[in-house]
Image: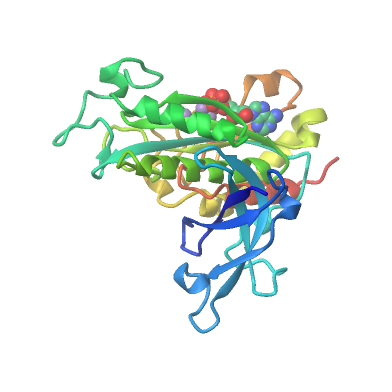
């Protein structure tokens, strides 16, 4: 029987942004294991801000498994952190707070910077490169540099090998800044895949001596920050919708503006300034095709009788997609379905 290398990964207890942790266990299976075949495991929560030293065991409960093509017989196993009883979610476990809804669909657009020696990849040692303009979806050495595309392409292939539902990638507005988009049906699937894609990217960059900078505004001045737009829809929004429901939904989003911003990633005031295709952090607005609004209403939505998906543009690149999906679905649930 082949021995599988199972990389159990989980989110630690750091706030406001959890870190990814992972460790390997070796198990024999006839063939690539199913989720149901994977045992719970444990870790020392006193090293991850998830427990006190005297009673330090936390439980890892596998919730999704992905082939890992970087290792022979490898798998990445996304886990929820549970209390020692194995059934109570740990307070840090935001995934467990997401309402179960197979009809909820999410698409996250993850922006990030590749970083070398504390600076965006491709920035000169001192000073700055040419101003923004040619970098977005650019080609050529002076736009994207010598190694970034190789990393981005390798990352894409590793994610596709893992079965992650990437929809696309692109070079972004600032030098050294990139984006990938993931779409998933079901309230937790896309968020799981964003975390696993982040993990694969960070691990890939180790061998290049680079870091992934997820902070939403790593460079001051006239350089774009990084977001993680959250595109969302429910069965009702896609199949029935209507202007009245849409307006009630937007009223609920406006009422909960603080609750949303609280989980949309740290330091978002640095990014949501009203400039660089953002709305100011203390304002709420929506608009058709408006990239300066909090929520962009796609043309297709308005033209189709207010049916389809909406784009919340406020979540930032460092936000936890579990907390974001959880909050979006809570607000949607406050609006009665007519
Ligand atoms: P832009 O950069 O113009 O905002 P992208 O093409 O990068 O647009 O992202 C649009 C996102 O919307 C994609 O990630 C896609 O998966 C997502 N999406 C499309 N249809 C739906 C839907 N019905 N429900 C939720 N998300 C959707
Ligand atoms: Mn995009
Ligand atoms: Mn983008
Ligand atoms: Mn977008």
Q: Residue furthest front?
A: 1
Q: Nearer the viewer, residue 131 or 274?
A: 131
Residue 157 in the image: x percent, y percent? 51, 29
Q: Nearer the viewer, residue 129 or 247?
A: 129
Q: Residue furthest right?
A: 338
Q: Is residue 191 left or right of residue 187?
A: left
User: What's the colour scheme?
Assistant: rainbow
Quarter of the image where one finds residue 173: top left
Residue 64 in the image: x percent, y percent? 66, 48
Q: Is residue 276 visible?
A: no
All told, the count of numbered labels is: 0
Q: Nearer the viewer, residue 153 or 104?
A: 153
Q: Is residue 13 visible?
A: yes
Q: Is residue 166 left or right of residue 140?
A: right
Residue 75 in the image: x percent, y percent? 59, 46
Which residue is rendered at x = 41% and y = 19% of the image? Answer: 137
Q: Is residue 297 left or right of residue 52?
A: right
Tell me the quadrant of the picture where the C terminus can be found.
Answer: top right
Quarter of the image where one finds residue 167: top right
Residue 323 in the image: x percent, y percent? 59, 52
Q: Nearer the viewer, residue 151 or 291?
A: 151
Q: Residue furthest bottom?
A: 54
Which residue is rendered at x = 73% and y = 40% of the image? Answer: 104
Q: Residue furthest left?
A: 126
Which residue is rendered at x = 52% and y = 40% of the image? Answer: 197
Which residue is rendered at x = 46% and y = 56% of the image? Answer: 19
């Amino acid at each position: 029987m082949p021995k599988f290398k199972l990389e159990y990964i989980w989110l630690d207890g750091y706030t406001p942004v959890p870190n990814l942790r992972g460790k390997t266990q070796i198990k024999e299976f006839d063939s690539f294991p199913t989720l149901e075949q994977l045992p719970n495991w444990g870790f020392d929560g006193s090293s991850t801000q998830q427990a006190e030293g005297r009673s330090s065991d936390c439980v890892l409960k596998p919730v999704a498994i992905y082939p890992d093509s970087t290792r022979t017989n490898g798998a990445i196993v996304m886990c929820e952190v549970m209390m020692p009883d194995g059934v109570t979610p740990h307070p840090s476990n935001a995934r467990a707070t997401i309402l179960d809804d197979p009809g909820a669909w999410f698409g996250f657009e993850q922006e990030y910077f590749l970083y070398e020696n504390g600076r965006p990849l491709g920035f000169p040692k001192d000073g700055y490169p040419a101003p923004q303009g040619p970098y977005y979806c650019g080609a050529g050495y002076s736009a994207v540099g010598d190694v970034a595309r190789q990393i981005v392409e390798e990352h894409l292939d590793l994610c596709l090998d893992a079965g992650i539902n990437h929809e696309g990638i692109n070079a972004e507005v600032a030098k050294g800044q990139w984006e990938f988009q993931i779409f998933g049906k079901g309230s937790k699937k896309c968020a799981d895949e964003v975390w696993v894609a982040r993990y694969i990217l960070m691990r890939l960059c180790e061998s290049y001596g680079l870091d992934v900078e997820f902070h939403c505004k790593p460079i001051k001045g006239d350089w774009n920050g990084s977001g993680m737009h959250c595109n969302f829809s429910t069965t009702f929004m896609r199949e029935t919708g209507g202007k009245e429901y849409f307006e009630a939904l937007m009223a609920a989003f406006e009422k909960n503006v603080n609750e949303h911003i609280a989980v949309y990633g740290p330091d978002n005031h640095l990014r949501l300034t009203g400039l660089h295709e953002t709305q100011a952090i203390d304002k709420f607005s929506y608009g058709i095709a408006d990239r300066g609004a909090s929520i962009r209403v796609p043309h297709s939505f308005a033209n189709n009788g207010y049916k389809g998906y909406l784009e919340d543009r406020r979540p930032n690149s460092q936000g936890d997609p579990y907390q974001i999906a959880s909050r979006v679905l809570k607000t949607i649930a406050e609006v009665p379905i007519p």
